[in-house]
Image (cartoon, rainbow, N blue to C red):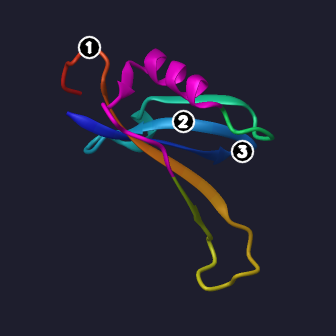
Amino acid sequence: MDHSAQISVRGGRWCLYVALMGVPVSHWPKHCFGPAAVVPTVAERSRALTELGYVFMDGAEWEWEEYSETTGDVTSPVRLLASIRVRSRNGVRS
């Protein structure tokens, strides 16, 4: 079964998590990196996912989007969110 891994800035740190349908958000696998000044590299994100028990799906690429908490206000700060399709590292359905 595949899942969506996402990374965004929370509390001044980049946090990567795996969204698991039907599971409370508080139980999603999560890894937070150091201060948010620099986006973690693809290799760093891959290592974090491996530690959480997941790997990228074949051919998957990170997709970045920006969003604002104030719809329609082009002067509001935006947040960045990236996502990628992942699967359990050991092939077990999660």
- Closer to the eye: label 3 or 2: 2
Q: Please provide percent x and percent y for residue 78.
A: 68, 66
Asked if residue 61 lies in the magenta stretch, the reply is: yes
Residue 38 figure quarter? top right
Residue type indicated by callout 1: Asn
Q: Which residue is mark 3?
A: 11
Q: Secondary structure at mark 1?
A: loop
Q: Which residue is mark 1?
A: 90
When the figure is inspected, residue 3 is found, relative to residue 68, above or below; the finding is above
- Residue at image position (19%, 19%) is 92
Q: Secondary structure at mark 3?
A: loop
- Closer to the eye: label 3 or 1: 1
Q: CA distance from mark 2 to mark 1?
A: 20 Å
Residue 12 figure quarter? top right
Q: CA distance from mark 3 to mark 2?
A: 13 Å
Q: Which residue is mark 2?
A: 16
Asked if residue 84 lies in the magenta stretch, the reply is: no
Of labels 2 and 1, earlier in sequence is 2
- Residue at image position (63%, 78%) is 70
Of labels 3 and 2, earlier in sequence is 3
